[in-house]
Amino acid sequence: MKKSNKLTLYIVIAMIVGAILGYIVHENSDTAFIEKFAKNIKLLTTIFLRLVQMIIAPLVFTTLVVGIAKLGDLKTVGRVGGKAMLWFITASLVSLLIGLVLVNVFKPGLGIDLSNADVNGAKDVMGKSQTFSLLNFVEHVFPKSMFEAMANNEILQIVIFSIFFGVAAAAIGEKAKGFVKALETVSHIILKMVGYVMNFAPLGVFAAIAAVIATKGLAIFIFYGKYLLYFLLGIGALWIVLLGVGFIILGKRIPSLLKHITTPLVIAFSTTSSEAVFPKLTEELEKFGCKDKIVSFILPLGYSFNLDGSMMYMTFASIAIAQAYGIHIDIGTQLTMLIVLMLTSKGIAGVPRASLVVVTATCAMFNIPPEGIALILPIDHFCDMFRSATNVLGNSLATTVVSKWEGALENPTQV
């Protein structure tokens, strides 16, 4: 069995064992022990995620600068970036529309019991959303310090700096070749580190699943069954659309792509963090046949501008909260909300529970009680698992499609 397949198997086993342990703890322990258990075991997940975060900033900087320098000039960077943004904007609009259509058809908010609200969790999210505005979005995009951006893992800010740096390196030509070559060596060293870090993935997955099942229990699916079911229908519809368009462009290579990104998908699903698989996804897309200069340019952009699963959830959750409170929102207002979400959701990849933060801010903007976020918080972790995996799929397709459009998609390696 290949090493990547073994890792996927170990992660799946870790998910199952974690779920069993979490259920046993939930059913046989008091609240105080459950809270202590969840807090302590999540340290394993924290260790894994911090190891990944340790790699992300230097990996984005080195690979992006090298990629742009290899692209050669500003005209090529603009062409590739333009194709990427065309995909991102289209995919975002489709995702938002799917969420909007399904929430209007199924009306999941009508089945939400107000007594199940997670008020304490809502206060935490609302505290983050109060500072979310267009002004802060602009500040979030443009760095005032590269070192601060790297310290905080602000991917979009690192991308902005790296684009300027890479274009400047390409502009001075021969003088920069030695430095670019050194950065390329550093990027290969970091990708080697990815393999070491991924060995901790099963432990991180085991702890994440055990903690959430111990805290929430399986009864949560009974209370929120309809909400989760309708959300999963939306995710399913989005996967069909994304894979359908991918098949039109990539043809018979779609199954091969899915094989390559299986491990990143499973890790993102089980840890609810698409950021956690950024280094591994970079490696797998290059193995699939995407040129490193395209991957290193498109993927960091995608992590800020192309969160398809999160986009679909934003319209779905916002309208569902309104439905739970019996608030009618006409189609014109809903379309306005869609445009607002399209703009305000960009560049929030580094914000914890980003989807909920944006949903809370949007509710307040459209006179929907923002504290209504408490109604969907109990089931949000499970929704986030599917959102994160969908984000990974969307960015994988974006990168491979742009590679194909650029004539930079080579024959895949065997998985």
Image: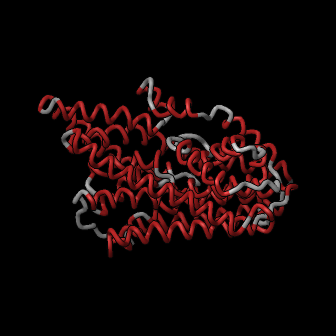
**Quadrant housing residue 144:** top left
| Apparent side of residue 139 relative to residue 26 in the rendered image (left or right) | left
Residue 106 vertical placement versus 41 (above, below): below
Residue at 45% x, 66% y is 242
Residue 316 vertical placement versus 296 (above, below): below
User: How was this image coloured?
Assistant: secondary structure
Query: Camera-side residue: 30 or 151?
Result: 151
| Apparent side of residue 190 relative to residue 364 in the rendered image (left or right) | left
Residue at 67% x, 36% y is 128
Residue at 40% x, 69% y is 259
**Quadrant housing residue 325:** bottom right
> Residue 340: where, in percent of width, then height?
58, 45
Considering the image in quadrants, where does the C terminus appear?
bottom left
> Residue 59: where, in percent of width, then height?
37, 42
> Residue 140: where, in percent of width, then height?
51, 32
Query: Camera-side residue: 130 or 379?
Result: 130
Residue at 38% x, 49% y is 85
| Apparent side of residue 108 relative to residue 247 in the rendered image (left or right) | right
For this orientation, the residue located farthest to the bottom is 252
| Apparent side of residue 345 relative to residue 361 in the rendered image (left or right) | left
Q: How many marks?
A: 0
For this orientation, the residue located farthest to the top is 144
